[in-house]
Image (spheres, rainbow, N blue to C red):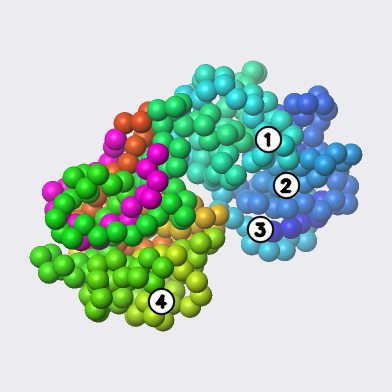
Amino acid sequence: MATGYVINRTTVYYGPSSTLYPSIDFESGATSSVGPNESVTVLWQEGSWYYIEYDVSGTSRKKRMYIVSSAVSNISGSLASAPVVSRTVTSSSSQVYTGPSTSTYVQAGSIGVETVTVYNKIENSMTFIEYNISGGQRKRGWVPNSAVGGGSGGPANHTYLTYSSGGVSLQMIRTRGSNIVLASLGETRNLLNSGEYGINGGFFDVGLNQTLNIAVNNGVPVIGQGVYGGLQNHMLYGTLIWTGSAFTFQERTYASQITGSHVWAQGGYPMYLQYSDWRTRIGEDWLTIIDANSARPRTGIVGTSNGDVYLIISPSATVAGFRSAIQAYVGSVSTALILDGGGSTQLRCRNASGAEVGYSQSRPLLQIIKLEDKT
């Protein structure tokens, strides 16, 4: 999150364009503007526009709107990744707000039963959307998750998403870090037959009941005691950690080396989305082990700064293509791992209509990353 300063009075808009999106305030009918001499919070940048948050004068409420970036000076801090389209859905009727709260932010408008665009931004159980208004224009704003979740048949605690970039198709489960628990299937069942929702976990030697990655819940190994029970990373040292309130990434050989509190910790190959020299950092020998240059099923996990976690698979991708597609969706975050792929790649959950979806293969799995609450 960053801050900035608007010296001159400047018009703000409901999206990153002064022609496609209006500036007229829904409640007052006046032109929305910021400044002069006003401090704002800068949430992200899209091209030559900033998405900002500011206080509404004379009230206790706030607004989030778009402003041309040249109007904001003295930027301090880091900007979040700009949102990308996750899907289009048929919404249910709802009021739309300029920020992720029905009480804190000014109303932006309303939607009915119509097609809306959903972005990969969720805060306080509200989703960032774009919808059409009269005159050929559009608005962006926030609605309760339930308004774009497909009604009562859809899941309340996870969202199934699809995304394509660079010829690579992704299937994803988005949920909260607090809704994840690591579990063992003991190489007796695949994910479909287990009755669980989630994805496959770390690398393992088929038939030996031995995991090659850290996999612990509250410090307890998922598979069992010993170096192959989930207490050690044998294949690189990337470890994604859920502290109970945030995600961290640490390079650790042993679970006992993890610093700070952790509710769960999963090991795997670091994606190094924030580095252009990721191949060098991983090492070509390690990339050869996972057949990085071949198009094959891939699995990954990404933790985000707001506590969301993405469980991701692709039916067919090189490691470079898989990384690039994920990077296009979530940005260059450091909290991302490549997990076991090939015949191990599996995903299962429910879509917005309540139907079970995913990617299934017959291989029995040793360790999975499952949703604690499937509803």
**In this figure, which residue is indicated by the disc labeled 4?**
251
As helix, strand or loop, the secondary structure at mark 1 comes to loop
Return the residue at label 1.
102
Q: What amino acid is labelled 3 in the image?
A: Met
Q: Is residue 321 above or below residue 160?
A: below
For marks 1 and 4 on the same chain, the one whose residue lies earlier in the sequence: 1
Of 160 and 40, nearer the camera is: 160
Amino acid type at mark 2? Glu
Span highlighted in magenta in the image: 356-375
Q: In terms of sequence position, does the residue under pointer 3 or pointer 4 come before the other?
A: 3
Position in image of residue 237 (x %, y %): 35, 76
Q: Quarter holding the N terminus?
A: bottom right
Proximity of marks 3 and 1: CB atoms separated by less than 8 Å: no
Q: Could you say where residue 59 lies in the image, as x and y percent from the top left?
A: 85, 39
Residue 221 highlighted magenta (yes or no): no
Q: Is residue 362 magenta?
A: yes
Q: 74 or 126, which lies in front?
A: 126
The residue tagged 2 is 53
Question: Of helix, strand and loop, which one carries label 4?
Answer: strand
